[in-house]
Image (spheres, rainbow, N blue to C red):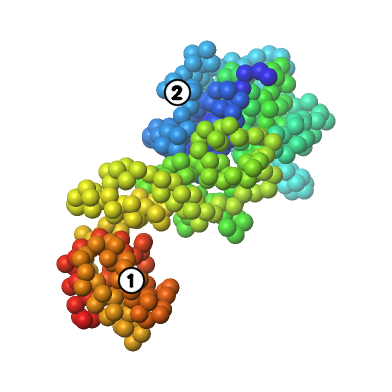
């Protein structure tokens, strides 16, 4: 097999989105699985949409996830040219000129009003989707020369008539489109910038990209890119178009949907475990042969198999994401978490606190938030206490007051209450939890109680004695 080289090529128009992260991850896993190279490069020619710091933020978020490119604008391999499209505008121009010289592309002099008119006329004539007609524009030779001198033209690829452009898609199998359904399309815009389809072909060729995994929204671009490869007499890479990611209702994720955290930055700020997200994203459109779900980076690299990329949309299930994160947070060393939660208490206390709370937290922020109930203990609560509950609390309180304040004794007191009243489960735990922690929910009860310290707990229980 030839050298495997894959790439992730975002536009620096904002933060790293779940969809982008998944594309980057699959290209990364693909390259690493086959011992290849993963490249990050930038499609930054849409100047109006670029945001300051876009490139840096994409790279930082990828690094946080554990996706480190082998080559990038910061780590270029000179052999492959520049890694930002804005730095290679002349190269696109040169190749466009070559295509003009070979008769495979031409200057189109229509201005925007004329193009709009052509669109409208086709609409009126019932043409379903616009096809550029190179003979539509009728202007005098002088006018043509004037526009030419002022560089008032775009460059379009001259498509061969009735020619099939097809490819064996890694995910979907054979796909083909007839050139007559496309029409001559712009490769260099009138402002001199290349279009996406043209620049991406030049970049992929120059960087010797072997495999392209990208979102299914690019399926319609692929035949155009194949036509460009053919005109330049270059070999195209292997393409695979990943299926869309939907919300739980089955609708395509929209960046405008504010009800769902969709940016990696959001998960980072909330204290999710990056390995959990890496792992979770790997299962958005891919499954391991042995159906294993929790997998380390190394395992994923080893198991990644492009044959197992899914053909149906993948649901973004935040509950599952939280579950993944829980599995990873649980395994973190206490010290790592302690460093991040800013606790005013001593090491012994912090250790017990983190050990107790990390068992069921999906994020470090969640653990940190729980610290508040110990830093600023509530002085009252509003939960209703039934007569039976009252009884439970009284017995528990009597038991606990008689013994030394240790986790074991708290546990024993719960046990004795259970025996004495012959109740169990929620009826036993809930009254005790509310009376001692002033919370309805929490981690392992004896530990949660112990963390408040003797003074606070006995004070809270006093009224039940
Ligand atoms: N900048 C494009 C995108 O983010 C890259 C498309 C491609 O991979 O060819 O969708």
Task: Name which quarter of the figure residue 172 lies in.
Answer: top right
Kindly state the secondary structure of the residue where label 1 is placed.
helix
Q: Which residue appears farthest toward the bottom when viewing the image? A: 387
**Does 248 sit above or below residue 152?**
below
Front residue of this view, candidates 325 and 89: 325
**Does 207 sit above or below residue 132?**
above
Q: Are marks 1 and 2 in contact (CB under 8 Å)?
A: no
Residue 345 visible somewhere in the drawing: yes
Residue 430 visible somewhere in the drawing: no
Q: Which mark is residue 414?
A: 1
**Does 182 sit above or below residue 364?**
above
- Residue drawn at 24 percent across, 62 percent down: 406
Task: Say which label, 1 or 2, has the lower sequence index.
Answer: 2
Q: How many marks?
A: 2
Where residue 322 appears, as percent x and y from the top left, is 47, 53
Where residue 240 appears, as percent x and y from the top left, is 67, 34
Front residue of this view, candidates 85 and 113: 85
Front residue of this view, candidates 391 and 153: 391
Task: Name which quarter of the figure residue 95 lies in.
Answer: top right
Question: Which residue has dot 2 on it?
Answer: 73
Front residue of this view, candidates 3 and 112: 3
Q: Quadrant of the N terminus?
A: top right
Ligand 1 within 8 Å, label 1 CB = no
Q: Real-space Cα distance between discs 1 and 2?
A: 61 Å
- Residue drawn at 67 percent across, 25 percent down: 237
- Residue drawn at 35 percent across, 43 percent down: 333
Answer few, some or many: residues within 10 Å of disc 2's Cα (few below 14, many 20 plus, some between 14 and 19).
Answer: some
- Residue drawn at 66 percent across, 41 percent down: 289
Ligand 1 within 8 Å, label 2 CB = no
**Does 268 sit above or below residue 304?**
below
Q: Nearer the viewer, mark 1 or mark 2?
A: 1
Q: Quadrant of the C terminus?
A: bottom left
């Amino acid at each position: 097999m030839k050298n495997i080289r894959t790439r992730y090529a975002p536009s620096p128009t904002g933060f790293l989105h779940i969809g982008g992260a998944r594309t980057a991850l699959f290209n990364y896993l693909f390259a690493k699985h086959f011992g290849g190279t993963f490249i990050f490069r930038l499609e930054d020619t849409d100047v109006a949409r670029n945001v300051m710091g876009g490139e840096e933020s994409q790279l930082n978020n990828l690094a946080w996830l554990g996706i480190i490119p082998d080559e990038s604008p910061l780590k270029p391999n000179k052999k492959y040219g520049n890694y930002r499209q804005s730095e290679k505008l002349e190269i696109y121009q040169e190749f466009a000129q070559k295509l003009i010289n070979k008769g495979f592309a031409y200057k189109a002099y229509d201005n925007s009003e004329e193009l709009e008119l052509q669109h409208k006329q086709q609409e009126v004539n019932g043409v379903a989707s616009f096809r550029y007609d190179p003979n539509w524009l009728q202007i005098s030779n002088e006018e043509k020369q004037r526009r030419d001198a002022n560089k008032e033209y775009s460059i379009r690829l001259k498509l061969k008539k009735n020619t099939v452009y097809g490819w064996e898609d890694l995910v979907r199998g054979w796909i083909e489109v007839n050139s007559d359904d496309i029409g001559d399309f712009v490769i260099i815009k009138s402002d001199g910038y290349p279009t996406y389809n043209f620049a991406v072909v030049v970049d992929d060729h120059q960087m010797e990209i072997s495999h392209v995994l990208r979102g299914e929204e690019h399926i319609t671009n692929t035949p155009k890119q194949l036509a460009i490869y053919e005109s330049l007499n270059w070999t195209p890479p292997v393409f695979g178009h990943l299926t869309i990611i939907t919300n739980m209702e089955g609708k395509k994720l929209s960046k405008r949907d504010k009800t769902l955290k969709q940016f990696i930055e959001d998960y980072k700020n909330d204290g999710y475990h990056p390995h959990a997200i890496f792992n979770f994203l790997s299962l958005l459109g891919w499954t391991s042969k042995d159906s294993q779900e929790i997998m380390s980076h190394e395992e994923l690299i080893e198991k990644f198999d492009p044959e197992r990329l899914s053909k149906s949309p993948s649901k973004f299930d935040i509950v599952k994401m939280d579950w993944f994160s829980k599995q990873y947070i649980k395994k973190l060393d206490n010290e790592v978490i302690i460093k991040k939660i800013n606790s005013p208490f001593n090491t012994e206390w912090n250790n017990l606190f983190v050990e107790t709370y990390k068992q069921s937290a999906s994020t470090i922020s969640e653990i940190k938030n729980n610290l508040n109930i110990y830093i600023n203990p509530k002085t009252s609560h509003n939960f209703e206490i039934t007569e039976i509950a009252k009884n439970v609390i009284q017995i528990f309180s009597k038991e606990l007051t008689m013994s030394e304040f240790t986790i074991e004794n708290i546990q024993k007191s719960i046990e004795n209450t259970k025996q004495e009243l012959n109740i169990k489960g929620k009826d036993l735990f809930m009254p005790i939890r509310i009376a001692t922690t002033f919370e309805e929910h929490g981690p392992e009860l004896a530990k949660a109680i112990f963390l408040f310290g003797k003074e606070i707990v006995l004070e809270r229980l006093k009224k039940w004695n």
